[in-house]
Image (cartoon, rainbow, N blue to C red):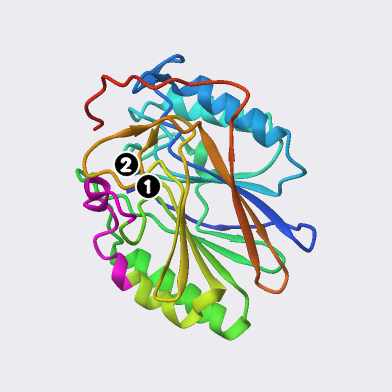
């Protein structure tokens, strides 16, 4: 199990600006492809897009960082992100290494991130040997504690996971969401609009409300999956990321940013994705 630990406190302007990146799927060697897309090239294009935005306070990467668990992929990820000059925080996904030999990456795997007006909780949904997600009891304990803190401090809470907590409307992907996601949503429910959940894994933009809590997913930085699909189906949408603007009073504004000045055609003959 990849441990998340410690906290990072960041000072920002009254409106904190966060970018969510997900499912970069960098392979062992540069130029590796997923469904025909060179994942290094598409990730680099998304990073250039982020570099063109007004100042960002932090980057949050919601898992499936590496496609084949190779340390070289994490090293290239770290090097590319460093060009943006912004702290980045990472979650593991089902494709990621389950344990890390190299402590150089520890600074990215934080449990808590504190903005001036918002708290962010990182939860690990990785379950060894399973494509689907699950929140171990230890993760639920962190979630209960963060909700209790938010209730007492009135600070809004953003929770980040790799697998979504609830189905997004794609049958083949909905089998893979967090198995005990309903339990997590029940824990969050008392916070209602003061809680936000952002997730990856489904390679598409979704915005839903579950138990009064807003839940978002994000496009991948490489291949996209088709919304509403019954079985594996890729989509022509470009690589992208999510911008979140987090206000002092708990309001959140969010939008998807996509690469529109380069094209990354998918291999339509691909029939699966492990
Ligand atoms: Fe995943």
Instruction: List x then y, in percent, for residue 80.
Output: 60, 27
State yes or no: residue 169 in magenta: yes
Determine contact: label 1, label 2, CB under 8 Å. yes
Q: Where is residue 72 in the image (x, y as percent from the top left)?
A: 45, 23
Q: In which quarter of the image is residue 140?
A: bottom left
| Some atom of ligand 1 lies within 8 Å of the CB belonging to the residue at label 2 | no
Residue at figure coordinates x 24%, y 60% from the top left = 179
Residue with the mark numbered 1:
2
Q: In this view, does 232 lie above or below 208?
A: above
Label 1: few (<14), some (14–19) or many (≥20) C-alpha neighbours in 10 Å? some
Number of numbered discs present? 2
Who is closer to the viewer here, 42 or 168? 168
Quadrant of image for the C terminus: top left
Which span of residues is magenta-colored? 168-183
Does residue 8 appear left or right of residue 15 in this picture?
Answer: left
Quickly name the residue at label 2: 98
Few, some or many residues within 10 Å of mark 2 (<14, 14–19, 20+) = some
- Height in image: 268 above or below 103? above
Task: Say which quarter of the image contains residue 138.
Answer: bottom left
How far apart marks 1 and 2 lie (CA) works out to: 5 Å
């Amino acid at each position: 199990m990849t441990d998340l630990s410690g906290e990072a406190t960041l000072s920002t302007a009254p409106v904190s600006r966060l970018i969510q990146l997900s499912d970069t799927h960098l392979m062992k060697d540069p130029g590796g492809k997923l469904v025909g897309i060179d994942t290094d090239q598409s990730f680099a294009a998304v990073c250039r897009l982020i570099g063109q935005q007004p100042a960002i306070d932090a980057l949050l990467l919601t898992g499936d960082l590496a496609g084949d668990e190779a340390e070289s992929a994490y090293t290239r990820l770290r090097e590319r992100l460093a060009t943006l000059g912004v702290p980045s925080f990472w979650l593991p996904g089902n494709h990621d290494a389950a344990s890390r030999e190299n402590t150089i990456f520890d600074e990215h795997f934080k449990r808590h991130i504190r903005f001036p007006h918002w708290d962010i909780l990182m939860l690990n949904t990785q379950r060894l040997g399973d494509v689907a997600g699950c929140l171990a009891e230890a993760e639920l304990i962190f979630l209960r504690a963060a909700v209790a803190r938010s209730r007492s401090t009135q600070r809004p809470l953003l929770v980040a996971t790799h697998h979504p907590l609830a189905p997004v409307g794609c049958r083949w992907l909905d089998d893979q969401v967090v198995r005990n996601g309903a339990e997590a949503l029940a824990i969050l429910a008392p916070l209602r609009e003061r809680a936000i959940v952002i997730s990856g894994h489904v390679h598409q933009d979704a915005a839903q409300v579950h138990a009064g809590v807003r839940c978002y997913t994000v496009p991948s930085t490489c291949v996209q999956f088709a919304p509403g699909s019954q079985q594996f189906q890729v989509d022509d949408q470009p690589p992208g990321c999510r911008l979140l603007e987090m206000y002092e009073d708990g309001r959140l504004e969010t939008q998807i940013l996509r690469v529109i000045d380069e094209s990354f055609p998918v291999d339509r003959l691909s029939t699966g994705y492990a």
